[in-house]
Amino acid sequence: MYNILVAGDTHIPDRASSVPRLIKEDIEPKRFDLILFTGDLTSKEVEEWLRSLSTRLIIVRGNMDYLPYPRQFTLDLLNYGLGLIHGDQVYPRGSIIKLSDLAKKMGVDILVSGHTHSPFLEVSNEGDVLLINPGSLTGVWGGGGGSMTPSYIRMGLNENYVKVELIELISGEIKSRSFEARKNASKKWEIREAE
């Protein structure tokens, strides 16, 4: 299993002073093969912390970043084409149709995005793109709202399926929900809640 931390939208120090202690304590003991960060760090402080967690870190530039990150990134991992964007490339925020169209233009079957400050795991209408959004690691307000709940995703990849574990800080407690996404015989993504 290839272990990936997916996070974004910290907005430190503009909207939050730091990543919540309980979220940091949940993340730091784990080992990640790769970290995907959807942008809007707004400072180098978060990048330095992320670099301490994995030898491989990919960050894209958010609409509030003035740091020299790429606007999008693609990579092949196992048998998946994986894309990473901030998400401000589409309007309205989080539009499944527009994110799916962008994923197809990028040539990927998994697209990780942020910008909404609300986590989601969705499949495109045609079933050919898996869309993943970790929400905001600090739980801060986004320009279009947001869940106001600190969240991130632990993602595991193998040749057969993608495991997505959504981690949220709710009422002072770490809560998690796990899902499995896999392609069926027709090469369409299907998601089911894991136990």
Image: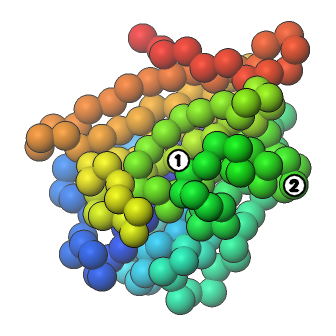
Residue at 54% across / 77% down in the picture? 63
Return the residue nearer the eye: 26 or 191: 191
**Residue 117, placed above or below residue 178:** below
Q: Which mark is residue 133?
A: 1
Tell me the crowding category of disc 1: few under 14, some 14 to 19, or many 20 or more residues within 10 angstroms, Cα based.
many
Helix or strand or loop: what does disc 2 sit on?
helix
Amino acid of disc 1: Asn
**Residue 188, placed above or below residue 139:** above
Residue extending furthest toward the left = 172
Q: Is residue 36 visible?
A: no
The answer to whether the residue labelled 1 contacts the one labelled 2, judged by CB atoms less than 8 Å apart, is no
Return the residue nearer the eye: 169 or 129: 129
Q: Give the colouring mode of the picture.
A: rainbow
Amino acid of disc 2: Lys
Separation of residues labelled 1 and 2 (CA atoms):
19 Å
Residue 190: percent from left, percent from top = 67, 18
Screen quadrant of the C terminus = top left
Left or right position of 114 against 85: left
Helix or strand or loop: what does disc 1 sit on?
strand
Screen quadrant of the N terminus = top right
Q: Which mark is residue 105?
A: 2
Q: Is residue 64 visible?
A: yes
**Residue 63, placed above or below residue 168:** below
Residue at 48% across / 80% down in the picture? 64
Left or right position of 145 against 112: left
Residue extending furthest toward the front = 92
Residue at 19% across / 50% down in the picture? 22
Question: Of marks 1 and 2, which one's residue comes earlier in the chain?
Answer: 2
Residue at 53% across / 89% down in the picture? 66
The number of callouts visible is 2
Residue 147: percent from left, percent from top = 31, 49
Residue 33: percent from left, percent from top = 59, 48
